[in-house]
Image: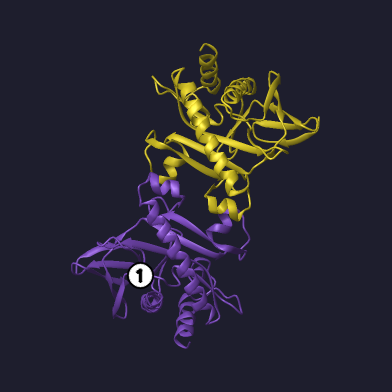
Chain colours: A purple, B yellow
Amino acid sequence: MKKLYEGKAKIVYENDDDTYIIKFKDDVTAFDAIKKANISEKGRINLEITSIVFELLEKNNIKTHFIKKLSENSMLVKKAKRLDVEVVVRNKAAGSLCKRLGIKESTELNPPLVELFYKSDELHDPLICIEHVKLLNLCSEEDVSIMKQTALKVNDILKAFFDNINIELIDFKLEFGKTKEGDIILIDEISPDSCRLWDKTTKEKLDKDRFRFDLGDLKEGYLKILNSIRSS
Amino acid sequence: MKKLYEGKAKIVYENDDDTYIIKFKDDVTAFDAIKKANISEKGRINLEITSIVFELLEKNNIKTHFIKKLSENSMLVKKAKRLDVEVVVRNKAAGSLCKRLGIKESTELNPPLVELFYKSDELHDPLICIEHVKLLNLCSEEDVSIMKQTALKVNDILKAFFDNINIELIDFKLEFGKTKEGDIILIDEISPDSCRLWDKTTKEKLDKDRFRFDLGDLKEGYLKILNSIRSS
């Protein structure tokens, strides 16, 4: 298979005219890949969670690139041209937001805060506003409006989904792509690599912050999420 | 006089119920005050330029806090509660924008780019979008809209003004305040400390970048601007 793109946690392969195959790696990186590790089964767990979440979203009329799982660590997806705008939705303050604006961790954000970032490893994914999207010609204003609305719908669906298994959705990052038909669909993954998820009772962090800040075994946190999903 | 606030380049003193007195210092700082110097007459020159520019703006129906010069380095201004949102207008890419978004210096920005920053020394004045203004409750959405519109009007006036004396207005920062009547007016200063100004013919940088990047004598650049204004 022809490798099209290799990211920090996934590889995208060419497949046929309409699809790609995405392989989930066991690599985990943080702080612009300054901190790195390889954690066995991480790829498998993240793919499993991503599949379940994308299927849930599809059932709720959110279009995603997900077609089906092909193996333990690979999935078949619909081709879509990636838009270089990442959309972050935050229900409570955490991570870069706290540092950037001096907001205390876990401050309630109501309405949820929607932020845009320019997807560029070289520039370390800087925060951008709608004016920068236009300046850099990343996509149209209408595209941004669709992405933001979709992100808020995804937030409603996932907040309820995780709440039901006693997990709080603190924030998450979405990536979008445009199909050849011109539809904007969710791409990439939705996993504990891209979401902050806290145990509602114990407040234990179950997501990638475990790795970033040495809060505990990464796989243990990810498996807690997957097992809670499975047993619901 | 009671000192109300001391910034890096100016001091604000209480005066009467309706006014403050602002003293321009000869201090110059850059990179969050890591680089510092005292340059004789800088205060006088910046106050002179600020007075001329504010009078020009007033003539063009832009409300400012400027009332009159009181001395070589102090001015009387109308009281206004500072809004903690700085508005930057950019006609060409320079400074932090180039670094942040990987844009080549002097790239034409058409339409001009308007950016908002959260005025906070502690947080190093981070870039913010309208969503952050609302989250931090810095001012209303309508206030932001007035500030942006005013900033673009100021840009038109100042671009023409400097163009006429063979200087190019690359970018500038504005601060706003709210009077007790509820009007949003321009406050602070407009000087080579807050504007990037390049000689149109030689492309020589005449503003604070001379100090930031050791491009030449600061006072010489500032005086070139003032003398060009005076002889026009």
Image vertical order of residue A47 relative to residue B42, above or below? below
Q: State left or right for residue A45 relative to residue A79.
A: right
Question: Mark 1 is on which residue type?
Answer: Lys
Residue B169 appears at what percent x and percent y?
A: 46, 27
**In the foreground, B53 or B33:** B53
Q: Taking the image as drawn, is residue B68 in sight?
A: yes
Q: Chain of mark 1?
A: A
Image quadrant in which you'd find residue A168 = bottom right
Q: Is residue A173 visible?
A: no
Q: Which residue is at 41% across, 45% downward?
A: B101
Q: Which residue in the rendered view is the most extreme toward the top? A: B231
- Residue lying farthest bottom? A231
- State how many labels appear: 1
Q: Secondary structure at mark 1?
A: loop
Q: Identify the residue position indicated by label 1 in the image.
A: A63
B146 on left or right of A80: right
Picture residue at 51% right of the left edge, 21% below the top: B221
Residue B132's x, y, as percent?
56, 53
What crowding class fits label 1: few (fewer than 14 Cα within 10 Å), some (14-19), or many (20 or more)?
some
In x, y percent, where is residue A56? 40, 78
B35 left or right of B95 in image: right
**Quadrant showing the N terminus of chain B:** top right
Q: Is residue B30 above or below residue A83?
A: above
Residue B168 lies, in percent from the top left, at 44, 25
